Amino acid sequence: MEQNSGKASRAGGAILAFTIVAGAIVGNHYGQPSIGTLIGTGVGVAIAVILYLIDRARS
């Protein structure tokens, strides 16, 4: 088991879940919930990767 250095890391999972749901809602408004879900997933993954890279650079 790896021990943390005491610095809190940011979690991207909540952001990912929010962007997927938001994409589906916005896509449904325009009559394309599948495309909205895919765009929301892409945006969420991009934000999660950016947060991961920022946390990795800080430690």
Image (cartoon, rainbow, N blue to C red):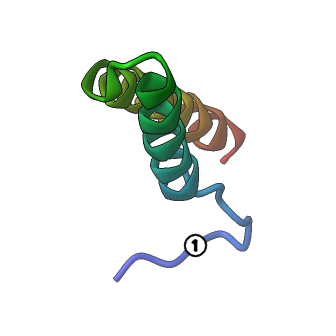
Q: 38 above or below 52? A: above
Residue at disc 1, secondary structure? loop
Q: Is residue 3 above or below residue 31?
A: below
In front of the other: 20 or 42: 20
**Where 17 falls versus 45 (above or below)?**
below
Q: Quadrant of residue 20?
A: top left
* Residue furthest to the left: 34
Q: Is residue 23 above or below residue 55?
A: above
Please indicate whether residue 12 sits to the left or right of residue 42 in the image.
right
Residue shown at the point (39%, 20%) measured from the top left: 39
Percent x, y for residue 12?
A: 54, 50
Q: Mark 1 belongs to which amino acid?
A: Asn
Q: Residue at x 54, y 39 (%)?
A: 22
5, 51: nearer the viewer:
51
Q: Residue furthest bottom?
A: 1
Residue denoted by label 1 = 4
Residue at point 32% right, 19% down?
Answer: 32
x and y percentages locating residue 23 in the rendered image: 47, 31
Query: Camera-side residue: 8 or 12?
Result: 12
Q: Residues within 10 Å of mark 1 (few under 14, many from 20)?
A: few
Q: Quadrant of the N terminus?
A: bottom left
Looking at the rendered structure, the number of numbered marks drawn on it comes to 1
Q: Residue at x 41, y 36 (%)?
A: 24
**57 left or right of 45 in image:** right
Pinpoint residue 49: horizontal percent, then vertical percent.
47, 32
